[in-house]
Amino acid sequence: MHRGWHGAGRGGRGPGRGGWQQADLPGADDAAAWLQGRLPDDWFTAAPEVTVDREEIVIVGELPPVEGEFADTEAGRADRAAAIAGRISRFRESTREERIEIARQAEHRYQRKVAWGARIGDEVELFTVASVPVMTRLRQPERIVLDTLVDSGVARSRSDALAWAVRLVGQHADEWLGELREAMARVDELRTKGPGASDD
């Protein structure tokens, strides 16, 4: 089972304004193991992928593949996608009440929100994700990047890490950014010449 915890364990405290108090979170190194023991054995074909950051625990489990053969045509691929969507929807509805209870227990234990998802092959659907009022509501993978920079000492905080990442992109994307600015300038110039532009 995969564990994506990127933070040191801390003593717990209840939720504060805008979410859990980041400075006092309990450790979540055992979250994947706890969930493996807590989840029903027949939900997923293997141990789910469990990724943890300071706000959220995301649980993504593999469902059995859809049965039947689908032609390698546009219509066949559309039918397969519809079958996968239906299977994931069925799992989501049939497990809703138990998932809510498991999430409640996990949130009490780890003081983080819990999100669920399901995978069939390469198709992944997340049911719920935390609306985190920090760092312009970044999703968990982006937050983990920032937390890794903080934990490694590259940055002092998420704000510093975000600034560091922006500087790094700027250094390595000067040519692309220059072309983008030129394109934006051309768009502005075309706007001034458009049918709606007023003549001086």
Image (tube, rainbow, N blue to C red):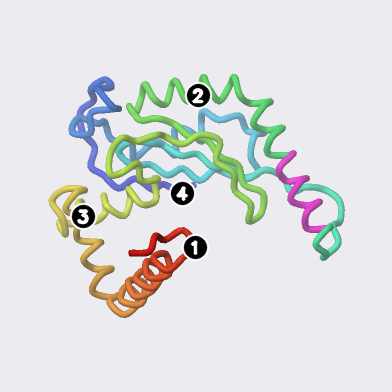
Name the residue nearer the viewer: 32 or 190. 190
Residue drawn at (25%, 61%), measured in percent from left and top? 165
Residue 177 higher or lower than 118, as above or below = below
Q: Residues within 10 Å of mark 4 (few under 14, many from 20)?
A: few
Q: Nearer the viewer, mark 1 or mark 3?
A: 1
Residue 17 higher or lower than 36, as above or below = above
Q: Residues within 10 Å of mark 3 (few under 14, many from 20)?
A: many
How far is the residue under mark 2 from the one under mark 3? Answer: 33 Å
Q: Please give left or right for residue 130 compared with residue 68 in the image.
A: left
Residue receiving disc 2: 102
The amino acid marked with disc number 4 is His
The amino acid marked with disc number 3 is Ala
Residue 182 higher or lower than 27, as above or below = below
Q: Secondary structure at mark 3?
A: helix
Name the residue nearer the viewer: 54 or 160. 160
**Magenta residues, as a range?**
76-86
Which numbered disc, 2 or 3, marks the residue that appears first in the sequence? 2
Q: Secondary structure at mark 2?
A: helix
Q: Tell me the tag on residue 161.
A: 3
Q: Is residue 149 magenta?
A: no
Residue receiving disc 4: 2
**What secondary structure characterizes most of the magenta part?**
helix
Q: Secondary structure at mark 1?
A: loop
Residue receiving disc 1: 195
Q: Secondary structure at mark 4?
A: loop
Percent of width and height locating residue 109: 36, 24
